[in-house]
Amino acid sequence: MTILAFRGGPRGVGLFVPAAVAAAALGAAAMTVAPPIVVVAGVIAIAGGLAILHDPEWGLLAVAAFTVLRLPDVATDFHGAPSLFTPLVAFVLLAVAVRARATGERPVGGLRALVLFGSFVLTAVGSLAFAADPATGTHQVFLLLKDGMVAVLVGMLLRRSSALRSVVWVLVAGGGVLATLSIVQFVTGSFDTTLGGFAQSAVQNIYAETDNVRISGPIGDPNFYAQMLVMLVPLAYDRMRDETTRILRIAAGYSGTVCAVAVILTFSRGAALALGVVAVALMLRYPPKLRTVIGAGAIALMSIPLLPPGYLERLTALGQVGTIQAGIDPSIRGRTAELTAAWDMFADHPLIGVGYGNYIVRYAEYARDSGIDVRSTERNAHNLYLATAAEMGILGVIAFGAIVVGAFVALSAGRRRFREMSDHRADGIGHAIAVSLVGYLITSVFLHMAFARFAWLVIGIALAFPSTAAAEDRARDAAVAGRLAWH
């Protein structure tokens, strides 16, 4: 299944196919003098570049694929390739500018994301005036810019409901591939290979004296990998319920199932909790039949003996956060120390915080004062909300809150307009995006803002929903007017 097969997909297929054929022919000749992997990458880049120049919507799909598969990081970390993401973004922006000049189209859909994200970045920069280590903070702001600009870029490129469906399918397909690789790796015990960097794993403590392998996909951290998988489940579920062909429904159902299974194999407690909430939220739009609920419950009960050793014990330990007495799980004690330090930083610097990216710099000092953790290592807060409060104060909390509220308000407005057009498929995608964001917000109770490019992409889709619906409405009106003029 490819995006090319979607009716109403990106324009430029007519250009893409001959460009790809020509590039492949040149590449076949070039393989006699250059390594095959370099030539293949070059062929893809040339063909894709021509397609993006013809229609920047192909750039949207490329950005989505790069983000969900983490292709730039894998290529750099495991294959020695230079940075790929920044050149892609630059090329897409160039294509947008060229098309705007040639056709008069103005990419206005990213304005809402630009204002909200820009306010957050400016607050982060302002917090560095009082930071103990401005250099560390500046580096973290740079990473924030790289990740968060995806939200602005998505808004600029997302103009039709057909593109909305296509980009969701890129994410669902990418998630299904990653989860499949992780599950195969876990089941076969092939932990001596990373499958090209897309299936990383490591032996870690699970509970008490129990250790086990935790899968971490292309991210390299099991908790953040699980966070992304949780966000993919509602997108896959929506496609499973709303696609028009059986093959696509089966593909979406498969992707959602393997993503959920892979969440379990990460041993992420916060993600398991979020997965349960996401399941309930999805049922609000598609209430299951009673026999379906009973069947699912029976399968869940029968699957308990198949859970990895220590999994249930690890889940129940989640309720011990905030407890510091002897015998408590070390990871829980560490999380308690990190949360306590974050609160103390906020209490000492309530307006602007200790400086963006400076929690890890100040952690040892505050942890030592609390007496919970005497380690001198740098630690993160493992709570997005307390981390934001600690590093950016109340101003940062307000800026981040504006992004979250803005995303849900934009989704509501866009969905309402899609319903007025009787576009229930786009409305359903909007609901799935909202549930995906709920999954992110729940897992963020246990995680800080790292590996956040995928989350920013989903936020960008949400913020672009009203402009996408408006553009779709105008296009349909223009099509109707064109047909009337023809007759």
Image: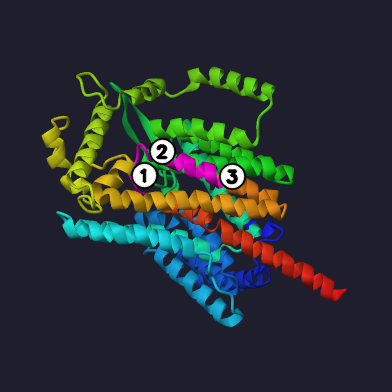
In this rendering, the label closer to the viewer, 1 or 3: 3
Q: Residue furthest right?
A: 487
**Residue situated in front as seen by the camera: 20 or 253:** 253
Q: In this view of the protein, which residue sits in the foreground, 348 or 169?
A: 348
Find the distance from the CA under tag 3 to the CA under tag 2: 19 Å
User: Gap in Å between the C-alphas at discs 1 and 3?
Assistant: 30 Å
Q: Earlier in the sequence, mark 3 or mark 2?
A: 3
- Point out the frontmost of discs 3 and 2: 3
Identify the element where label 1 is drawn. Answer: loop
Measuring 20% from the left and 41% from the top, which residue is drawn there?
A: 347
Magenta stretch in the rendered image? 433-451
Circle 2 residue: 443
Left or right: residue 188 versus residue 12 is: left
Residue hosting label 3: 431
Q: Residue at x 69, y 57 (%)?
A: 5
Q: Quadrant of residue 443?
A: top left
All told, the count of numbered labels is: 3
Magenta stretch contains residue 437: yes
Q: Which residue is mark 1?
A: 220
Image: 309 above or below 236: above
Q: Is residue 242 left or right of residue 133?
A: right
